[in-house]
Amino acid sequence: MLSEVSAPPLPPIPGRLGIDLAEATLRGFALRNVRIDATTDGRSWAIEQAVANLPGETELRVSGTVTSDAGSAGFAGDLAMTSQRLDALSALWRKPQDNNPLFNQPGSLNGRLLLAGNAFGLTGGALPSRARRIRLRCGSVLATNRALTARLLWAR
């Protein structure tokens, strides 16, 4: 998905950029109340914060560095996502079903996010739940295969 986004223009001077959007559409789903605060030193972009709302009373926050590799955008930074209703959030990628175990369940995901072209990785991820804390590390190179590799560690 990121390979479809061109690298942001980079002015040859330092500066600050603030963007407020009521809604942005990405591959058929809406990001609402989008706020991006970024700075540039003339060589790269630093995202101080990017915040957006998703279905299920979900807030997505990222901060980090935007990279450019052969004209394609990349990102390395921190991710924090908190949802009050995982069932509504999961409806973005799967059809809702009766007796959904995610119904009205809150959840969150935190970690270090790496995106470049058709590859992504999440390290140091944590999925806190009521019973346990799940540590997560996953990654994929979508250009060569569609498989997702993941490592989950359960802790009490």
Image (cartoon, rainbow, N blue to C red):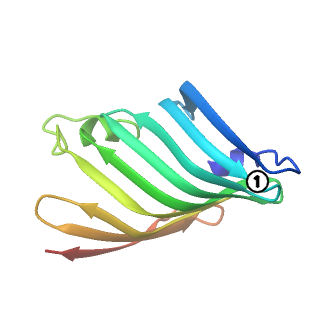
> The C terminus appears in which quarter of the rendering?
bottom left
Q: What residue is rendered at 37% in x and 60% in y?
A: 110
Q: Quadrant of residue 123?
A: bottom left
Residue 15, placed above or below residue 56: below
Q: What residue is rendered at 23% in x and 61% in y?
A: 128
Residue 10, placed above or below residue 87: below
Looking at the image, which residue sits at the far right? 12
User: Foreground: 143 or 46?
Assistant: 46
> Whole-percent x and y of residue 3?
70, 51
User: Foreground: 14 or 88?
Assistant: 14
Label 1 packing within 10 angstroms: few (<14), some (14-19), many (20+): some
Would you say 48 lies left or right of 82 here? Answer: right
Per the image, label 1 sits on a secondary structure element best described as strand
> Whole-percent x and y of residue 20?
58, 29
Residue 123, placed above or below residue 89: below
Would you say 30 lies left or right of 44 here? Answer: left
Q: What residue is rendered at 83% in x and 59% in y?
A: 70
User: Foreground: 127 or 12?
Assistant: 12
Q: What residue is rendered at 49% in x and 60% in y?
A: 78
Whether residue 4 appears in this view of the structure is: yes
> Whole-percent x and y of residue 96?
27, 34
> Whole-percent x and y of residue 81?
37, 49
Looking at the image, which residue sits at the far top? 22
Amino acid type shown at disc 1: Ser
Which residue carries the number 1 mark? 72
